[in-house]
Image (tube, rainbow, N blue to C red):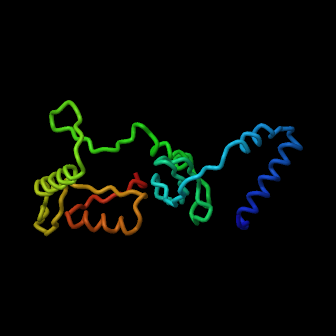
Amino acid sequence: MEMRRRSFLALAGAAGASGLLKTFFGINLGASKAYASSRPPVRGKVTTTICPFCSVGCGMLVTTAGGKVVNLTGDPDHPVNEAAMCSKGAALSQIWNSDQRAKKVLYRAPGASRWEEKDWDFAMRRIAERMKETRDKTFEERDEQGRIVNRAMGIGSLGGSAMDNEECYALSKFARSMGTVYLEHHARL
């Protein structure tokens, strides 16, 4: 393992804090040390990613094994958060590993009382049809003063921080080509 400045400072700080706790406060860390040494290191594929919760864009290292997220830590080399994580980011693995997470397309027809499983082709086709219907119903070529506006007042676009710059650019271009004037980002809400 390569020792970097940040790693050295973290190790030195932990050692100093441990010494202070034991010397001045009489706190015994033996049980915690034994528990930490008894746990095997987490093995799996480590992937870098960005936290999807807010617009800060904190970097994370996600370890996956057997199709499950087994470890989640802040990325120490990321310039935004430098390995720190908020409580929402730290709990991100619970979303991925949750039994309640939707993994299939579910559709409930108008007036129906139950959900049906559908394939992705159906979902994409249905979304496109509904967008076209809404655009056609709410499209305005001119405003009250007769000026050309070409806007669809019934469609809005909500972006998110999980998207990178290129995806945000493509989404905004698509939304504007549809005539959408309501473009928003979830971090402002």
Query: Residue 174 at what x, y percent from top left?
Result: 25, 65
Tell me: residue 184, above or below residue 68: below
Q: Residue furthest right?
A: 23
User: Of 182 and 87, which appears nearest the observer?
Assistant: 87
Q: Is residue 105 above or below residue 112?
A: below
Q: Residue at x 30, y 65 (%)?
A: 172
Instruction: Judge from the rendering whether residue 176 lies leftward or rightward of residue 169; answer left or right.
Output: left
The percent coordinates of residue 101 (x first, y second) are 39, 41
Give residue 76's quadrant in the image.
bottom right
Q: Tell me where residue 97 appears, x and y as whole percent.
A: 46, 42
Q: Residue at x 54, y 60 (%)?
A: 59
Residue 179 appears left or right of 52: left
In screen coordinates, is 8 left or right of 23?
left
Give whichever of 34, 151 is nearer the camera.
Answer: 34
Q: Given the current orientation, which residue lies at the most extreme top position?
A: 113
Q: Position of residue 103 (x, y in %)?
A: 34, 44
Q: Quadrant of the N terminus?
A: bottom right
* Residue 119, placed above or below residue 83: above
> Across the whole image, how many numbered discs are drawn on residues?
0
Residue 54 lies, with reference to residue 175, above or below; the image says above
Q: Residue at x 72, y 39 (%)?
A: 35
Residue drawn at point x = 33 percent, y = 55 percent: 158
